[in-house]
Image (spheres, grey):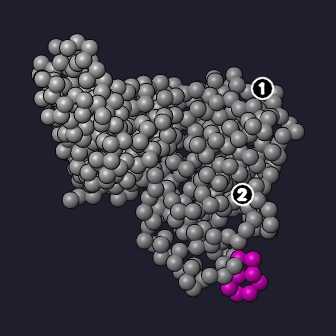
């Protein structure tokens, strides 16, 4: 059902937790649909220095959250804003079709965190 | 790695003695029961023996058993068949909100044909109230269909009383007993049951086998046409190997029921107790006592069911969940929501169903592995994090 990469990120998720002194925070999803993703990040000089996630949800939700944190660490916020949910899924060698809509929201959470940073910066 | 199969409510392995007789009726005794020659007569004898074996398990007469392709077909035949045969008497059907989809979707189909269906609510343990059934009955009611035991939470419904009530009002009573058959005693006569659905692969029989018990005198409109088989109620050449397997599985289930009931209930209670003691924020779903001996259904707050299942699977433990992610829809279990669980708790549910080969060691293995799995997922969960922050 899931690719090896999804199972790897689900079993050994990267960057779990909450960034200390975060200056951007984004949360998407709700308990009704069964997925909540929360991303915190620290931006310095336009670069994402640190990023962490916490996710309530299925393996796809956890794996996409983990993957997106790996994809953007060290990137500029412009580069990070260009990453789409689809790109995250592709980086995981794809997701089952039914998961593309409900559990593939990690980039949205990331973008929300960046916008939160930009609002206060 | 140890493998522990705890999904017996989904399906069971076929017993060796059953598989043996099934293959015998495929390879050597392959006759068509409708044929006049010795091959046919041998097949006919086997067919009727299986009918008696199934009938004996529920105290029915052999002539009251119709073999089907499984529980879903039997539910469809019962509900559609009774509704259409009795449409001149009335158009109202009573069922519950927690039925299997084979019942729910058939009732919804009948709504499109002009029937009116009352979907009764259940309480927090998953029980239908007799009072609610009573209140729902009206002049036009022709059928009550309430399951014996719920497939997700294992709650046993008061069908004997519901059957009595139906009988007093001259209403036909059907029960889906797929999850209770062979696990708890069923007596269709004592329990006032007019129609009953059973399935083969839940009792260590072959998949694609099942039956509908139809009490003598109950009118039923068939769903298929084209032969004399099953008294024209389910025409088509019989799946004889499957039916013979179902018959033997039913006989053995009856013989071992008492012993299995005691064994499995004790392991079930050990599992429930152990999970509650080792993991905080756990809810037992379903009735605390009035449940089939094989069912454990628990919800873990702050985590999601599919993640739990995949983590359990990585330890060799096979279970199921009422989470939306495992149902292929966007909604979590209709049963858990009807019982009043929040979406979060419904998403975080895990069902473990024991079988005759489940051992004490299996249960201990699950208990040894479960706490760390929940803990790992909770450490990742923003809901748990929120809760920890608030409680400081």
Q: Tell me which residue sits at (70%, 82%) in the image.
A: B40
Q: Is A1 colored magenta in this rendering?
A: no
Q: Identify the mark at residue A55; answer none if there is no mark.
A: none
Would residue B384 be found to the left or right of residue A48 on screen?
right
Question: How many other residues sit within 10 Å of disc 2, few (<14), some (14-19) or many (≥20)?
Answer: many
Say if A17 sits above or below A10 in the image. Answer: above
Disc 1, SS: loop
Residue under the image location 25 percent in, 29 percent down: A78
- Quarter of the image with the C terminus of chain B is top left
- The residue at the point 58 percent across, 39 percent down is B99
Q: Position of residue B319 (x, y in %)?
A: 36, 48
Residue B282: in sight, yes or no? no
Whether residue B25 is visible here, answered yes or no, is yes
Chain letter for the residue marked with disc 1 in the picture: B
Q: Nearer the viewer, residue B58 or B214?
A: B214
From this view, report whether residue B224 is shown above or below residue B98: below
Horizontal arrangement in the rendering, residue B34 relative to residue A10 (left or right): right
Quadrant including the N terminus of chain B: bottom left
Is B74 placed above or below B265 here? below
Residue placed at 88% from the left, 39% from the top? B88
Residue B287 occupies quadrant: top left
- Residues in magenta, as a range: B33-41
When asked about the image quadrant of residue B274, the answer is top left
Per the image, the residue denoted by label 1 is B138
Mark 1 residue crowding within 10 angstroms, few (<14) / some (14–19) / many (20+): some
The residue identified by callout 2 is: B64
Quadrant of the image occupied by residue A99 = top left
Q: Please tell me whether mark 2 sits on a helix, a strand or a loop.
A: helix
B22 horizontally vs B389: left or right: right
């Amino acid at each position: 059902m899931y690719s090896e990469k999804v199972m790897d990120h689900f079993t050994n998720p990267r960057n779990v937790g909450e960034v200390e002194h975060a200056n951007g925070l984004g949360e998407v999803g709700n308990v009704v649909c069964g997925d909540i993703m929360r991303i915190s990040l620290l931006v310095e000089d336009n670069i994402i220095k640190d990023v962490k996630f916490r996710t309530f949800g299925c393996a796809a939700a956890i794996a996409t959250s983990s993957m997106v944190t790996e994809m953007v660490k060290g990137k500029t916020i412009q580069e990070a804003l260009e990453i789409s949910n689809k790109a995250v899924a592709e980086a995981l060698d794809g997701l089952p079709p039914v998961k593309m809509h409900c559990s593939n929201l990690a980039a949205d959470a990331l973008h929300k965190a960046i916008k939160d940073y930009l609002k206060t910066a | 790695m140890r493998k522990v199969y705890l999904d017996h409510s989904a399906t069971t392995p076929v017993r060796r003695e059953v598989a043996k007789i099934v293959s015998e009726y495929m390879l050597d005794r392959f006759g068509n029961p409708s044929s006049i020659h010795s091959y046919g007569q041998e097949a006919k004898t086997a067919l009727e023996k299986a009918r008696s074996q199934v009938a004996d398990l529920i105290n029915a007469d052999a002539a009251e058993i119709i073999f089907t392709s499984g529980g879903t077909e039997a539910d469809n035949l019962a509900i559609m068949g009774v509704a259409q045969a009795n449409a001149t008497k009335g158009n109202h059907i009573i069922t519950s909100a927690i039925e299997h989809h084979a019942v729910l979707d058939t009732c919804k189909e009948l709504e499109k044909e002009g029937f009116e269906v009352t979907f009764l609510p259940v309480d927090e343990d998953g029980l239908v109230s007799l009072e609610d059934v009573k209140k729902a009955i009206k002049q036009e009611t022709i059928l009550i269909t309430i399951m014996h035991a719920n497939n997700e939470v294992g709650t046993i419904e008061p069908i004997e009383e519901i059957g009595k009530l139906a009988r007093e009002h001259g209403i036909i009573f059907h029960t889906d007993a797929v999850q209770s058959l062979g696990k708890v005693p069923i007596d269709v006569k004592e329990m006032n049951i007019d129609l009953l659905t059973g399935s083969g692969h839940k009792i260590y029989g072959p998949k694609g086998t099942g039956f509908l018990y139809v009490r003598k005198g109950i009118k039923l409109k068939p769903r298929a046409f084209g032969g004399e088989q099953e008294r024209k109620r389910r025409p088509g050449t019989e799946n004889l190997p499957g039916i013979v397997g179902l018959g033997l599985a039913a006989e053995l289930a009856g013989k071992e029921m008492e012993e299995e009931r005691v064994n499995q209930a004790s392991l079930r209670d050990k599992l429930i107790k152990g999970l509650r003691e080792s993991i905080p924020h756990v809810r037992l779903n379903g009735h605390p006592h009035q449940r089939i001996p094989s069912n454990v259904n628990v919800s873990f707050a702050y985590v999601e069911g599919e993640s739990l299942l995949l983590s359990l699977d990585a330890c060799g433990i096979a279970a199921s969940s009422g989470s939306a992610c495992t149902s292929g829809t966007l909604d979590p279990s209709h049963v858990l929501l009807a019982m009043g669980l929040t979406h979060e708790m419904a998403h975080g549910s895990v069902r473990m169903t024991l079988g005759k080969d489940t051992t004490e060691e299996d249960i201990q293995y699950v208990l040894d592995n479960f706490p760390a799995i929940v803990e790992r997922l909770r450490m990742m969960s923003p809901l748990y994090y929120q809760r920890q922050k608030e409680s400081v």
